[in-house]
Image (cartoon, coloured by chain):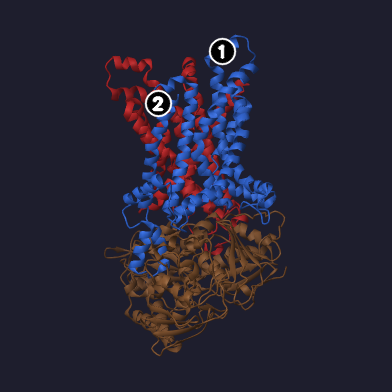
Chain colours: A red, B blue, C brown
Amino acid sequence: MRGLGRFLRERTAATGAGFVLLLVVLAVFGPLIDGTPPNAIDHAILGMPQPPSGAHWFGTDLLGRDIFVRALYGARVSLMVGAAAMIVSFTIGVSYGAIAGAAGGVLDAAMMRFVDAMLSFPTFFLLLIIAALTETFSLGIIILIIGLTSWPGLSRLVRAEVLSLRDRDFVEAARALGARPGRIVLRHLIPNALAPVVVAAAFAVGDNILAESSLSFFGLGVQPPQASWGNMLQDALAPEAQSAPWMVLVPGLLIIATILAFSVIADGIRVSLDRSISQSAADDEPPAELLAVPTAAGNSSRG
Amino acid sequence: MSAYIVRRLIGAIPLLLFISLVTYAMMALAPGGPVSVLGPRGGNLSPEVIANIKAQYGLDKPWYIQYFYWLKELLFHGSLGNSFVDHRPVIEKVFEKLPVTVEMIGLALLLTLIIALPIGIYAGAHRDSLVDNVASVVGFVFYGVPIFWLSIVLIDIFAVQLRWFPSSGISSLGAEGDPIDRLRHLALPVVAIALTGFVSWMRYQRSSVIEAMSSAYIRTARSKGLSERDVLFKHAFRNALLPIVTLLGLSLPALVGGAYFVEYVFSIPGVGYLTFSSIFSRDYPTIMAITMLTAVLIVAGNLLADIAYAVVDPRIRYT
Amino acid sequence: MMSTVVRAARLLARLRFAFCALAAAGSVAACSAAPAAVHAQPGTLVALARADGATMNPLFAQTVQDASVYGALLYDGLSDLGLDGANHPALATSWSHSPDGLHWDVSLRRGVRWSDGVPFDSRDVVYSYHLMLDPKTAFIGEGDIDYIKRVTAEGPYRVHFDLAHTSARFVDAALGEYLLPEHILAKIPDDRQTFSSFGEHPVGTGPYALAHWEHDSDVLFERNPYYWRGRANIARIDFRIIFNDQAEVDALESGSADLIDDLLYDQSRRLVRESPQTRLMTFPSLYVNTIEINLMRPGLADKTVRQAMMYAYDREATVRGFYDNHVRVSNNLIVPAMSRWYNPHVRTYPYDPARARALLDADGWKLGTDGVRRRGTTRLAYQVLVNQGSVSITDQVLAFCQDEAAVGIKLDLRQLDFASTIQRAYSGKYDLLADARGGTLDPDYTSVLLSTQRPPAGANTTGYNNPIVDHDLIAGLAELDYAKRRVYYDQMQVQLAETLPMIWMYGRYAGTAYSKRLLLDPKVTLQSPLIWYNVQDWKLSS
C-alpha cells in the first residue's frame, strides 16, 4: 500500500508539473500562433454570448470576444503575477526571516512583532486600500502589492527553520572556525532552511494567483480590456452568465486547475525533500509538513 | 506559567497599538475621505458648512491628531466613536452584525473539523495510502477555488437547479426567528467556507499524527507491547488534538477573510458586509473598530496557541 | 427636508454608484430559490431594495433610499411633487409672492398632526428652516436654500419668507424640503443634531411611520393614523434588503415580494423571459449616462477633439447590444421626459467615424506610427475612470474605448471604488469619467455648469467655462416666468450640444416591476424613486 501511495504521489506531482508546463507553453506561444486579438469587441454579437463552437472553442463573452484566446492571455497574466509576486515575497521573506532568526534577542523579537502585525491584517483589506491608493496602475504595481502582503508568512517559516538550525553542530563548527555571522547566515543557515521554504513558495504561487483573481474580480486588479482570469470572472456578475455558463466556468476551472497543479508540485517537492531528512532529526524537528500554515513555533521564543 | 502568560499579554499591547496606528494611517492616506463622498450631493455647500461637517467628524485635524483622539476615546471612555455614515455608535453597528458572522464562522469551523479531523487522522495513520493521496488532492482542489466563484457555483447548483436552499439573505419572510430556516439560509455559505479551508486542518492533523506516531515515546510504547490501536488512541490521538487550538488562532485571518466574500455574494448582513461598505464609504471609525476587533481576535488566537505549546513544552516557559 | 426632485437629482446623479458598488458587485448569475413562496402577510406590501438607507433624519440623508424612498414615506414638505411632475401644495394650502419675488407668504394646512399625535403648526416650519439654514447644523442641502434670509410665523397657520434674491427653484426645492417636528428636535442644540437618535426614531407627517429597523436587512413601516390625506390604503410596507440583482428578481417571481421599484434593465429582461405575468412599468428616462470630460486637459480642451469623439462613438450599437433598443441615444443633458424644457433643435452627432477623422485631420491632429494622434507635444491618449461594481457599464465603456481607438484616440480604462472616483473628479485628477446626470425636473444646472462653481465652491468638475451659458444659468434661475425661462434654457441646450462638456451616451433605463396583488396608480409617470410620492393611494388586492 505504501509503495503504491508513493508511486501515486509521484505521478500526481508529475502530472501537476506537466500541466503547468503545458500552460506555460500555451500561454507563451499560443497567442502567437492564433492571431485572434483578445480584446476585439464584436459589435454584431454584443450582449449575446455565443456557446463553444468550431469558430470559438470556449465560446464568446458579453462583448463578443473569444474566450479561449482571452484565457490564454489570461494565463500569461496569472502565471506572471503568481510567479513574480512569489519572487518578491520570497526575497523579502527569506532575508527578513533569516536575519531575525540569526540575530536573536531584541532585534528578533521586534522584527517578529512587526510580522505579527502584518499577519493580523485581513489581507484583502490591505489589498483593497493599497489598490485604491495607487495613482498609476500597472501589472508591476499589482505584483508588488501582492508580494508585499504575502512575505510575512514566509519570513516566519524561515525564522523557525533558522532557529532550529542555529544551534546545530555544523553551525557550531563554523563558528568555532571563526566564520563571520554573515557568512554563517548565507552559506549555512539559508541553504539548510530552504527546504520547507521552497515548498511554501510553491504554495505561495497558488495563493498569489488567488489574490490576483480576487482583486481583479472587484475591479481593482488587472484592468480591462487586458484579460486576466480574475477579471474574466467579473462576467459571472452579469445576468447573462446564467444562460452562458461557459463565461464563468472557463476562468474558474483554469484557476482551480492551476493552483491544484502548483499544490501537488509543492507536495511532491516536500516528499522528495523529506526523504533526505534523517530519521533522528525528524524526532526533534517541528513537523516539516506545516506548509500553507505558518508555524506557531515561530511565534513563541523558542531557542 | 502565569508569568509567561502575563509576559505574552503585555507583549500583545504594543502589537495592537501598532496595528491601530498603521490602519489609521493607511485609511487616512487613501484618496477620497468621507467628506468627499458627501460633497457632490451638497453640490454647493458653503465653506462654513463644510468646515462644520469636517469638525463634526474630527477631520479638520491632521491624521495623527485624529488618531490620537480616537485612541483617547477608546482608552479613557471605552468608546469607538460614531460612524461617519449614520452617526450611530460604532459599537452598536458592529454588534448588531456580529451574531450572524459568528454563527456562520462557527458553523463553518464545525463543519471543517468534522470533515478534516477524521480524514486527517486516518491519513496520518495510513501514510501514503490511497485514501491519504486522494484526500490531499481533493483538498488541494478546493484550496485553489476562489471562494466567491465557489459561492456562485453552489448557488447555481443547489439554489437554482435543485432548489434545496435559498440563495440569499438570512431569513425568509415570516420565518425570522425560525432556527431551521436560518440554518437553511446559512448552509451554502458555511459549506463554501468549509470546503475552501479544510485542507490546512487536514494536513496539520495528518502531520501531527505522523510525528506523534514516530516519536520516541511512541516507540517506547510499542516496544512495551501496546497494540497499534492503543498507540493510536491513547497517545497519538491525544497529541493530535492539541494543535487544534493552535490552528484556530492561526487560521482566523483566512476564516474572517473568507467570511467577507461570502457575505458579499450571499447578501448576508454581517461584519463582512459592513467591512466592505465602510471601506467603500470611507467610514473611518467603523473600519478601525472592525480592524481592531479582528486583530484582537487574531492576537488572542495566537496567544492561546502559544499557551497550548507552553503547556506541552516546558522549555518554552523559561525563555 | 430636500424637495423630492432636488433630492433625487443630487443623490441619484452621484450616488447611484455607491449602490452599484455594493449591490451590483454582489449580484450573482443565479436564481434564488426562495423556499416555497411564503406569501407576505395580507395587508403588507413587500418591497425590495439593493441597499439600505443610513439614516431617516432628512438633514443628514446621504443615499437615495433614505432621502427619497424612506423620506417620501415619513415626511412632507410645504409643496410636494404630483403625478403630473408639477409641484402642488402639501403641508401648505397656498402661497403667493410679492412682485419682486423676494417676499413669499405661505398658508399652512390645518388639522395636520405628527405621527405621535402632536399638532403641526407654523412653529415647526420656522424651526425646520432655522435648522436647515444654520451652518452649525451642517445640513447637507444648505447650499440649495441659502438665499432664504428669514422665515417668520404670522400666527399658527401662516409663514413668511424673505429672500436675498429671486429663485425659480423656490417652490419645488425650498418649499419642498421635508419639515421636522419642533417639539422633539428643539431640545437638541443645533451642532448636536448629527448625533441625535432622531434618525433611528423619526417622527414625521407623512403617510407612514417607522415600526422596526434591522439595518441592511429589513425595514418595516406602518401607516400613520394621523395622515392628513387620510389613512393610507396599505397597512404596512416592509423593505427587504437583497444585495444582489438575481435574488431580487427571484423573490419577486416566487411571490415572496411585491415590488422592485428601481429595476435594472438586465432584471427586466429576465422577468420578461421567465415570468410574463409579472407587471412591468417602463418610464421615460430622467437620467443620461455620460462620459465627463476634464476640459483642462490638453487635447480635450479642444472643441474639435470632443466633437470628433462624439462622431466616432457608435452609441446605437451600445443601445442595441446592451439594451435591445429599450433606451434611446441621448443628444442633450436635458432629457426628452422633461417635456416642458427639452429642446430638440440642438446639434446631433450621428455615428460617423469618417467625419471624426476628417475633423481631427483638419485640426492638425496627425496619426502617429503607434496609431495615436498627436499635434506638437500633445498626444490624444487618456484614461477613463469607471466605478467598479457594474459589469455592464465597464463593458460599455470598453466598447467606447474601442470606437475611439479606431480614429486614433487611445483610451485606457481604470476601475476605481466610488469614493476614489469622486475625489479625483473633484480634484481634477482625471481625464474622462463615466457618470450619469439628471434626475431633476428642472433644467437648472448652475452648480454643475456655472464657471464660478469649480470645486470646492461647487460641482463644476469638468471645468466648463462658457459665458453664454453662464448668463443663461444666472438669468434662468432668477426668472420666475416660465416662458421667459424657457428661452434661456433653450439656448443653454444649444450651447451644450455644440461645446460638449460631456459625451452623452443614452437615457438610462427606468423600470418598475411588481406583482399582481399590488395596484399602482396607472397615472404614475415618474420613475423611481419618485413613484413613492403617491404611495398612500396604492392598494393591495389581497
Q: How many marks?
A: 2
- Position of residue B34 relative to residue B79, above or below, is below
Is label 2 in a helix, a strand or a loop? Answer: loop
Q: Residue furthest top?
A: B224
Note whether B6 is above or below B106 in the view shown: above
Q: Is residue A49 visible?
A: no
Q: Amino acid at mark 2?
A: Ser
Q: Quadrant of the N terminus of chain A?
A: top right
Which of B116 and C206 lies nearest the eye of the viewer? C206
Inspect the image, locate mark 1, and give the three-letter code of the amino acid beneath it: Arg
Please report the residue visible at 69 percent of the width from the left and 51 percent of the height from the top: B163
Residue occupying the point 51% across, 25% down:
A271
Residue C291 locus on image (x, y percent): 43, 67
Task: Indicate the chain on which mark 1 is placed.
Answer: B
In the displayed structure, would residue B64 be above or below residue C520? above
Image check: C258 left or right of B82? right
Q: Position of residue C34 (x, y in %)?
A: 67, 55
Q: Nearer the viewer, residue C252 or B309?
A: B309
For image coordinates 48% across by 62% down, the residue present is: C17
Give the image location of residue B319, x and y in percent: 39, 22
Residue ID for mark 1: B219
Rounded to the nearest angstrom, the CA distance separating label 1 from label 2 is 29 Å
- Closer mark to the observer between disc 1 and disc 2: 2
Across and down, in percent, residue A264 comes to 53, 32
Residue identified by numbered label 2? A301
Dot 1: element? helix
Q: Are marks 1 and 2 on the same chain?
A: no
